[in-house]
Amino acid sequence: MKIKNSIYLGTTILLIGCTTSNRQASSNWKSFSGDKTIERKVDSVLKLMTLEEKIGQMTQFASSWTTTGPSVADDFLPYLKKGLVGSVFNAATVEGLRNMQKVAVEKTRLGIPILFGYDVIHGYETIFPIPLAESCSWNLELMKRSAEIAAEEAAADGQHWTFAPMVDIARDPRWGRVMEGAGEDPYLGSEIAKARVIGFQGGTDWKSLKEKHTLLACAKHFAAYGAAESGRDYNTAELSEHTLRNFYLPPYLAAKEAGVATFMASFNEVNGIPATASKWLMTDILREEWDFKGFVVSDYTGINELVPHGIASDDKHAAELAANAGIDMDMTGATFIKYLTELVKEGKVSEATIDTATRRILEMKFLLGLFDDPYRYLDENRAKSTLQKPEFMQTARKAVAESVVLLKNNSNLFPIRRDVSKKVALIGAMMKDSINLNGEWQGRGNRNQSVSLYKGLQEAYKDSNVQFTYAQGCSLTETTSQGIQQAVSVAKNADMVLLALGEDFNWSGEAACLTDIRLHKAQRELLAALKQTGKPIALVIFSGRPLDLSWEDENIDAILQAWFPGTQAGYGLADVITGDYNPSGRLVMSFPRNVGQVPVYYNQKNTGRPVMPDNPQGDYRTKYEDAPITALYPFGYGLSYTTFAINNAKLDKNTFSKGEKITATAKVTNTGSTDGEIVVQVYVRDLVGSVTRPVKELKKFQKIALKAGESKDISFEITENDLAFYQQTMKKITETGKFKLWIAQHSADNSNELDFELK
Ligand code: NOJ
C-alpha cells in the first residue's frame, strides 16, 4: 500500500514523535490499554498535532446519508479536507467509506484515518430479533453470537464502531426504547450487556479489536435514560442515588467490566444535571470509580441540547460544560469543532483535557489497526462474501424461535401439528407483513426482505394436512365492515383462527412513546368480531414493547408474543407454531394489566403496607381499587409445550459466613410429553437491611434442555458478592442477616422457598 504520511509506519512513527515535534505531550501519560507500543505511537502522533487537529479528532459528523435526529447542517467536507474529522456516523458502503477515508488519509496534513460508526443494534444486514426479544431467550451464548455476526457483517462493510449495546434498565412500556434493551432486571441486564459487548468486540481484551471481524462497542445511554418520567423519551430522570446505583447503573458497569471500548452519554438529565454535562457521571463515577479507559461520545446533538435543557446559555457554553464533564467526542453537534479552540485560549477548558480525549480516540484507532492500514476494513469482496451468509441466517432463525414467549395456551392450541387435519384461517394485518418485522434500528437491513409469517407458514406446512385460508380483516389502524365480515366468514369456515396483530415498527424505538399500550382500536374491533364466531383463536403479537393484553388474556385462547423478529421472522415463528421448536422464551419485562399500573416491575419494594396475600383487597394497603397490583404476566414468565416441575429444592447449609458460599440444588423434571427447555431462576430476598431491599432479586439462572420425562439435578452457588448492595452511604457491601431464596420458574413463583442466614 502506498502510504502518503509517515505516521502509518509503525517504526518511523517513534522517530517522528521524538525528533520532529517541539509540541509537548504530557510526559507521564500511560496508554489506556496498557500497551507500551501503542502508548508511544499515540504520544508521537499527538506531538505532531495542532490544537485544532486534536479537537477535530473529538468531532464526529453525520453523513447526510442517514440521520436519526435533527441534523446540524454543517457540510463536513471542508473539515474533512483540513483533517478535522475524527469520526463519521452512519455512512455506508465500502466504496463510499473508501472515498471519505482517502480524503482523510491522503489529502490532509497528518493523514489520520476516520473512525466510522454505525447504529448496528440488532444486526447489520442479517437482522436479528429486537434486543428486548432476544433477551427473552435468556441464552447468553446466542446473544453473544448474534453480536459477533452483526460485528462481522458491519466490519466487512467498512464499519469500525457500533452504538450498541443499549443497556438501559427499562420499567415503563410506554417508553418506545424498551425495544432496544434487555428489560427491567439489573442482574440479567448485566449478563446480557457483557455477552453483547464481548460479542461485538471479540473478547474482553482490547487486543481482539485488531481482528478484522470485530467492532468497538458502545455502552449506552449513560445514565438512566430508561428512567424517563412518564415513559416519554428524552424526559427528565429523577431518581435517588440509591435507585440509580442499585438498579440502573449495574449494566453499564458490567459493560465496562467486559471491556467496552466506548460509552455514550444519555440525552436526559439525572436529578437536575443533564448527563452530557455531568462531571459526576462522566468523570467521578465512570473514570474515577470505575476506571473506564475508553472514550465517551455524546449522543446525537446531545451537547447542543444543553441549551434547551437550560443549563448552558449557548452552544459555546455547552461545549465547555460537556468537555469539562468528560465528553471526549461530540456526536454531530459541531460544538467542539467550533468552540473548543477558543475555550482553550480563554482558559475555560484545559489543553490537558483535549489531549486526554484525543489520546483516548487515537488509541482506539491504533487498536483497530487503522494506522497500520486505514483501508483494512474496506474490501468489496469481503463484504460480498460476508453479508447475509447462510449460516448467519440460520442463527437468526434460531434466535427468532428462542425469543418468542408463549403467554397463554388453552387447550394446547399451539402447536398446530402438521399431521392433524385442520382448516386454519390466517387473519390479521401482520400476517402478510414484512415491512414491520425488523422493528426499529434495522441497520442496513432490507424491510422488504424479511420473511412474513404467511410465507413461513406456507413453506412449513407445504406437505401437511393443514389447510389455510386467508383474510386480512383490517389494517394496523383502520377497519371496514367489509374487511371484518370477510375475516369473520373465513373464520367461520375454519376449525381455528391464527391471528397476527400488533404494532407498526414506528410505534416503538427512539422518540416513539405511547400513552395507550393496547392493540390499536381497529385491531380490537376485529378481535371482538372474531371472538363472536366462537372459533378457537391463537393470537401472534408483533410489538416493540409489552402491551396491555388484559382483554386478550381474558378472551383469547392462546397468545404468542413474537416481538419484532427480524429477517427470518416467518421461518423462526413457523418453527414454533409447527412445534419443530418448543418455545423457551421468558419475559424480561413485566406485562401490565393496564397502563395505569405502569411502572410495574418484579423487584419492587415491599412498603410498610404491603398487600396481604390472603386478602389482596384488604383496606389501607398499597393497592388499587380497580385492579390487582401484580403484573398480568410477570418477569421471567413464559409457557412451553411441555410442563416442568422443580422439586427437592435445598441448600447445603442454612447459615454461612462471609468468604464462604452456599449452594442451592433442586431436581428439575420435564413432566410433559414433549422435549423442551426451561429457564430455572434463583431469586433472593434480603429480609432486613440498613436500607430497604426489593421483595425479590434475580441472582442466578440456567437454561436447560430436558427430554420428555427427563430429570436433571441443578445447582447454583451464592456468594457474599451476590448479596451486596449500595447502602445509604453509597458503599457497596453485603450485610449479614436472614434471606429467603426461591428456585423458581418465574418471578411470581413462590413454590420452592428456602431460608438461609449470612453470619
Ligand atoms: C440517538 C440515539 O439516542 C442513539 O442511541 C443513537 O446511537 C444515535 N442517535 C445515533 O443514531
Image (tube, helix red, strand yellow):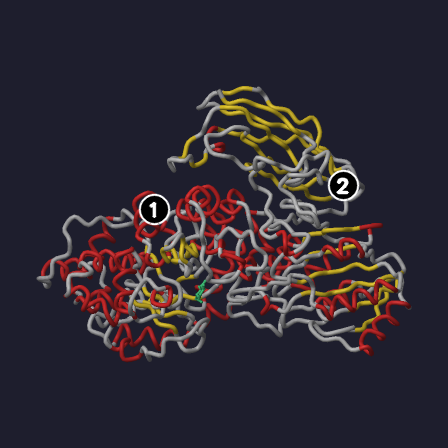
Q: Where is residue 8 in the image (x, y as percent from the top left)?
A: 24, 64
Q: Residue 285 carries which label?
A: 1
Q: Are the two marked residues, 2 and 1, in contact with CB atoms closer than 8 angstroms?
A: no
Question: The N terminus is located in which quarter?
Answer: bottom left
- The residue drawn where x is 76% and y is 57% is 552
Residue 394 vs residue 108: left or right?
A: right
- Is 214 in front, or is 621? 621
Q: Which mark is residue 643?
A: 2
Residue 238 in view: yes
Residue 315 vs residue 585: left or right?
A: left
In the image, what residue type sits under mark 2?
Thr
- The residue drawn where x is 45% and y is 68% is 157
Q: In which quarter of the image is residue 115?
A: bottom left
Identify whether 550 is placed above or below 740.
below
Number of disc labels: 2
Q: Which of marks 2 and 1 is nearer the N terminus?
A: 1
Q: Position of residue 721 (x, y in %)?
A: 46, 32
- The residue drawn where x is 65% and y is 43% is 623
- Quadrant position of ligand 1: bottom left
Q: Where is residue 252 in the image (x, y as percent from the top left)?
A: 43, 49
Residue 704 in view: no
In the image, what residue type sits under mark 1?
Ile
Q: Quadrant of residue 730?
A: top left
